Amino acid sequence: MDLSNAIVDEPPAILRGTSRGLELIVNGRAPIDAIASTIEARIGEAPAFFRGNDIRIAVDDGPLATGCLGKLDELAAKYDLRIVEVGALAAPKPDLAAGSAPVVDELAAIPEPIAPVSAPMPAPTIIHEVVEHLVGPKLVIGPVRSGVILDHVGHVVVFGDVNPGAEVRATGNIVVLGRLRGTAHAGIGAPMGFILALRLEPQQLRIGRQVARAGDSDTPDHDAEIAYATGEQIVVERYQGRLPKNLAASL
Amino acid sequence: MGRAIVITSGKGGVGKTTTTANLGTALAQLGHSVVLVDADIGLRNLDVVMGLENRIVYHVVDAIRGKCALQKALIKDRRLDNLWLLPASQTDDKDAVTPEDMKTLIMELKHGYDFVLIDCPAGIEQGFKNAIAGADEAVVVATPEVSSIRDADRVVGLLAAADVPARLIVNRISPHLVKRGDMLSQSDVIEILALEMLGAIPLDDQVIATTNKGVPAVLEGKSQAAREFVRIAKLLAGHEVPAPESVGFFKRIGRVLGLSASPA
């Protein structure tokens, strides 16, 4: 789903993570093909993130066209999703403009400090946290240890280190107030995003669909650094107290 | 009521069993009653390191299954009157006991002894879950190698998830390799693991020699490693402990220890 388009037009379908699992809002007036391709594109942005989840389908604006549910069922099977509920959209429509606004606006729109989430100590199995969009950034008390995978819909701020073998994934941006030595994936499903760390020594950086791995040179930099995607590559530069101009312009 | 401490590491071959044997012996020498539990079911070797192999009649699985009274499975040490060993079974596997079984067993032992030291198997599977089930606290053993530290980090995460507070022992530090920059130093290890450090055991040929004889190094006495084990045992028991000996690299540990506040 192209985020910028969502602001302007009613999208054929919106797929998002909520605290109860995935939620799919389908526009009843949209053509089946448009719905299917929107969903496929969205899942294609982060297949691993969506795979294996429960999904609730809410239909907006009238009954589904004939054959649409069959198509949805087919897609669910293809991506290993379980449809647990299908119904009409009861709640007021999500605020699309806010939900898919460019990242900087969303940062600016955070109304008040959010109470720190208790330290997400790693469960014996991988932690997959899918949280309601718009709840604001997730605050994580580190260290995030090896074997832990943090998933968040939105931005993530880690106070402490992200150790090798750990992975932080976010649909928004990632800020690590410590050493980033594991893997970070920012801007999942978005065209842009950045990763900022006091020490950027990652195993791998991923922004959107781009991947960069740590260089083989062994020159630790003691300054805060920021990584962001420009067109075809991921750029890392020293963080000088503000976002790089070209990044700020693209957000 | 005693304290149950699990000695674990994630990675194999870093010295869990040697550490268990030496800390247990040192605690017993300090006058505490100690029972060592070998939780490495199927691959027992704490009994070998303690030199008690030929006295095993019953083992931990027998005790759990009620084939014998718990007291009957405990083997008294040859040298110290207040040191006991509960050996592992060699013929069963890790699924022979459940974490609930272990909890009950360790609780029973805690009523009779000051310290229950649990020697954890390598890995993070069933054996690990069994070993940490009854533990009040953990000692994580890591060698200054990247692979060991990576595994230790994973294990510390799992311990935290199970609400078991952990402290660190760095094993097999080689002072001259650290000085040459060919080995990770304690500060490197602490930087990654962010754990309170109990101590660092120097690489010591004597430990290998005594371990093979079935005599814990602290009983033979004079090596640097033995002295460090005794110091750590005192720390565990809550005695006043002097800062580590200031021989070259030990100076650095002191500094690091001062800095290494326990993380949240």
Image (cartoon, rainbow, N blue to C red):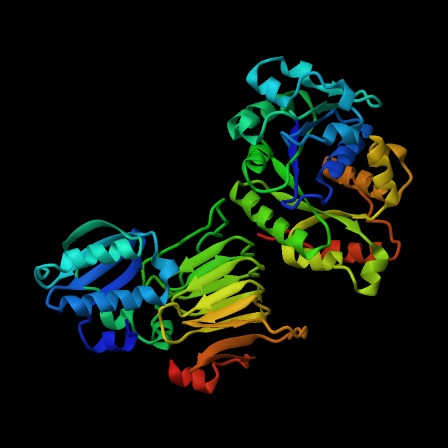
Identify the residue at image location x=62%, y=29%. Answer: B41
Relative placement, left or right, of B5 versus B21 is left
Q: Is residue B102 visible?
A: yes
In the picture, the quarter occupied by the N terminus of chain A is bottom left
Viewer-side residue, B35 vs B51 = B51
- Can residue A89 be seen here? The reply is no
Residue B9 percent coordinates (x, y):
65, 44
State whether residue A197 is above or below residue B261. below
Q: Nearer the viewer, residue B24 or A36?
A: A36
Quarter of the picture holding the C terminus of chain A: bottom left
* Along the line of sight, the residue nearer the viewer: A140 or A203: A203
Q: Residue A22: x and y, percent?
A: 29, 56
Q: Quadrant of residue B28?
A: top right
Is A221 on the left-hand or right-hand side of A142? right
Identify the residue at the far right of this view.
B222
What residue lies at 24% left-to-right and 77% top-to-bottom? A5
Q: x, y (%) of residue B57?
A: 70, 16
